[in-house]
Amino acid sequence: MLFHSSLRRELARSFGATLVVLFTIVITMLLIRTLGLANKGSVNPEEILLVLTYTVLGRLPTVLTLALFIAVVSTLSRMYRDSEMVIWFSSGQGLGQFVRPVFRFAWPILLVIMLMVLFVWPWANAQTDELRDRYERRGDLERIAPGQFQESAGGRRVFFIDKDTADGTEGRNVFISSVERDGSESITSARSGRVEWIDGVQYLMLENGQRLEQPPPGSPSDAALKVSEFALYGIQIGGGSAAASAGGGLKSVPTQQLIASPNRAYLGELGWRIGMGLTAINFVLLALAVSAGNPRAGKSGNLIFMLLAFVFYYNLLNLGQSWVATGLVGLWPFMLALHGGVFTVSLLWLAQRHYQFAWWPRRRSVVGGAA
């Protein structure tokens, strides 16, 4: 049918152009953020591209939802502005007849959004967390560059070391300044050191060195500075090799696990993921209703309302996740209230645009006066 094919063709062009623009903006923002994390030492500089790829995959459902929303609004607004809608309306095609071709175009995108938010989103977050955790769990000896002073992961030690192997497991001229939890301070120096794993824990084994220990403040007056020499001395410099990391928490949990263990936190995350798919469906209906308007008023009003509606709806979705996680509201009552409410309002608004009925009686103006 000419009506369906022409509408889907224009929707495809508008969606493609909008997606390219939004995708470019998102990649630029995430690249700046990833570079900042790498500068802070949270991300391995050699894995910036991997972290950026996984992060973009995680944000792609939101980008697709917004691009689809903008494509429908911009396409129908242009048809109103160029008086094409008048031609379709005069030929018997009301606004309600646009629902079928729009959803026929949008259903593959809606399916991709739902699959990505249910499966790709947790997988991408898990991969990003694994890269970060692997970089954070690396030994303190691996954190520093030769000839430079560098703090350890906990910030309680300062290292200076000259590495002499490519894998960073051995070094020469080791210097370590450490502040213990009780306030005592120590300075350790050694001619050489090597990394060893003992019972799954990473240690720096120092050879032929000296250690100075300063007692904590408030110690008895007879506590003096201790100086000791050693032939072999071990210092723990890393966590266990199989230590589990908290990672990104709920964002990295697979959807199957959320369904299998329905506690409050898991239900909140599950509701957010399902809600993202329902949000995309509601936005398509809302776009059909909001695009109808006065062509003389321009399209700025529709775009402003569109952006405000997207931000408001998305924030309610995030807020509802915390409400469900804390037990303030149940999952299904919240889903029914938010998504069911938006779906109902969108249908009613679309029906009002289609049948052109008034929500309340209009006042009649009286012209003239009594004789």
Image (cartoon, rainbow, N blue to C red):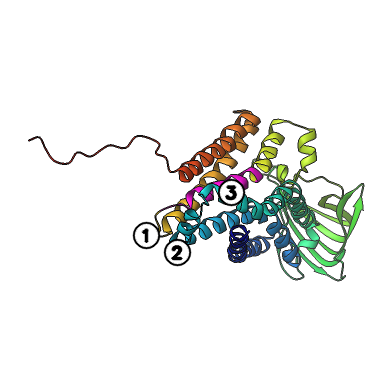
> Marks 1 and 3: CB-CB under 8 Å?
no
Nearest to the eye among marks 1 and 3: give it.
3
Task: State the residue position of label 2.
Answer: 82
Give the mark nearest the N terminus, 2 or 3. 2
Say whether residue 179 is left or right of residue 308.
right
As helix, strand or loop, the secondary structure at mark 2 comes to: loop
Amino acid type indicated by mark 1: Arg
As helix, strand or loop, the secondary structure at mark 1 comes to: helix
Say whether residue 136 is left or right of residue 21.
right
In the picture as drawn, the residue positioned furthest to the left comes out as 371
What residue lies at 72% left-to-right and 36% top-to-bottom? Answer: 266
Horizontal and vertical percent for residue 303?
47, 56
Most common SS among magenta residues? helix
Horizontal and vertical percent for residue 59?
66, 55
Q: Which residues are magenta?
A: 277-293
Which quadrant of the structure image shows residue 368? top left
Q: Nearer the viewer, residue 320 or 110?
A: 110
Q: Residues within 10 Å of mark 3 (few under 14, many from 20)?
A: some
Amino acid type indicated by mark 3: Val
Task: Reply yes or no: does residue 138 show up in magenta.
Answer: no
Task: State the residue position of label 1.
Answer: 296
Task: State the residue position of label 3.
Answer: 99
